[in-house]
Amino acid sequence: MRKGTRGSVFRSAAEKLWVSFANLNMQQKLLIVFLSLVCLPVVMASYASSYYYTRSIKANTIAYATEITSKMVVKLDDYVTDLYNMSAMPLYNKEFLQWLADPNIELQKIKSMDLYIENLNKIKPDTMSVYVFDNYGHAFFNIKSMGKRNNLEEVKSEWAQIAEKGSGRPQLISTREVSTDKDTYYAFSVVRQLKQLNDMSPIGYIVFDTNITAINRQIQDVDQVTKGKTILVDENNTVVFDSDGKLITRNLSDDESIRMATADRGSFHIDVDGKSYICTYAKSALTKWKMFVYIPMEDATRQAAVTRNITLLTTGAFVTFALLIAIAISYALTRPLSKIKTLMQEVQTGNLDVSFNQKYRDEVGLLGRHFNIMVTRVRELLEEVKLTQTRKKEAEYAALQSQINPHFIYNTLEMIRMKAELNDDEEVADMTFTLGKLLRYGVNHEEQHVTVGKELEHLNNYMLLQNSRFSNKFRLVIDIPESDYEIPCIKLMFQPIVENAIHYAFKDRLEEGTIRISVRHKGEDVVFTVTDDGSGMDAQRLKALREHMTGNRVLTPGKGIGLRNVNERIKLQYGEVYGLTVESTENEGTRITIRLPDKRLREEGLEC
């Protein structure tokens, strides 16, 4: 369907709808207007308020959860840092290093080693066991309550490889299931290779097994607040900790949350098992582990939902009550209006001997009162209309005469010029002719937008008169290429600026003055510069002039009017970013910058 056809169909439907509305009785119209202007906005405002309140709750929840997640990651990093520091403590015990480097096994050595390892195991409540291995196959360890690992011989070689790879730096091993004779639990480990301090030769390694209850202790308070769950995965996307305890040690590389968490920190909405969650995540700079906090959307927006329901119920009750009141009021209003309608039909037939019985002082009563006044004043109004028509004709005649006056001035100047030529006074003739051109250009109200070329032509005529008056005291230099003469601009743009320079810049100067007009292009704008080498202004006068141009200050009558007028007309025509800028230095001169949009260039660019 063509655009014109669609518009015709729309107008036809709108007309039919309006006709249907117009044919309703007044009571029905009032009810429809009430529903449209009162009930509907109230309902929409209530819904919008509820909607944006819910959005605000979600945004605040996400911001709070993101911050909490980052803080929990920092706390976890602090805990792991403590474990790293604990693994480095044997390096500061020379006696322990000597025992570890000694291949002999003595009772005193075993007791001392066991006592030192036991003390290390007591530093953190969640470290379950500490193992120390030397290069001679000897193992020293301390176990708390869960018992020694059943697979110690199997993991020993793996630990040795990890320690050797770290070469003295602590290495973090993700959560794994640990089986003992007494129980089974999940733990993550820290492994560090131990070296001699004199030659940095490896003499063994130390391992700390830490129960994931250490992580749970960091997280459980947050889960109670958010009513959600927390998952911690390592850099291989294997679950280190899960507050539900169902996903520990499982790889989640294919999980949607892992795919969406591409940054080091952020949040997103996700559905898990048919339930909507707000998920915030943060990545540890130390361990490279990533923590995910899932907040149920239902819990996060529960208060907002309660507020929304209360708002909607209150709005519904208000609208219902208001509708009943509107029905009663509309019925009460339509009865006197029907009476007025009947009386107006009588007036329409020419019967002016009618009157409305005013009982109340409400709007309908006032309407009836004014109806009575209208009927009694019909004849007076008719007389006033006749008088108004007569005055209108007189005003039109006066306007016609005002249009004739400029032509009278032009004709008079032309007669003076011809008289001067007859008297061989060419200078007066030329000045009169130039003045006529200036006057014709200035008072031609039909042409308010001109080109730069026409403005410069008008300016040259103005300078001819001024130099005739002041004996060629002023020199006008126009540094504008002819290619820019077609740029559109407002009328009378340059002349008031040059006139201001003549009146003030060269007021107390006897030698010749120079006024230069140049142009440069800046992006899609064109900038004209009017520079004089006159007396200039000090900082105080320049500030006052700038404030006057912006309307914030009034100067002495007659000063700066032309500049302010040009500035205001440019801003009204093209926008606030355009206009005049004044710069001046005392005893050096003044520079006025005119910024305009280069509409010619823009139009050419569009055509290209």
Image (spheres, rainbow, N blue to C red):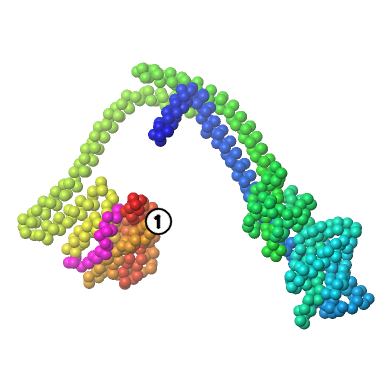
The residue furthest right is 107
The image shows residue 146 at horizontal and vertical percentages of: 88, 60
The image shows residue 555 at horizontal and vertical percentages of: 35, 60
Q: Which residue: 38% across, 68% down?
A: 539
Residue 474 among those drawn in magenta: yes
Q: Which residue: 54% across, 30% down?
A: 35
Report the side of 225 relative to 483 (left or right): right
Which type of secondary structure does the marked residue at label 1 adopt?
A: loop
| Type of the residue with mark 1 | Val
Q: Is residue 568 visible?
A: no
Please count the marks in the image: 1
Residue 337 among those drawn in magenta: no
Report the side of 342 relative to 601 (left or right): right
Q: Which residue: 57% across, 39% down?
A: 45
In front here: 345 or 7?
7
Residues in magenta?
470-491
The part of the image, by quadrant, that contains residue 67 is bottom right
The residue furthest bottom is 198
Mark 1, residue position: 577
Q: Residues within 10 Å of mark 1 (few under 14, many from 20)?
A: few
Q: Which residue: 14% across, 52% down?
A: 413
Report the side of 129 relative to 457 (left or right): right
Q: Which image quadrant: the N terminus?
A: top left
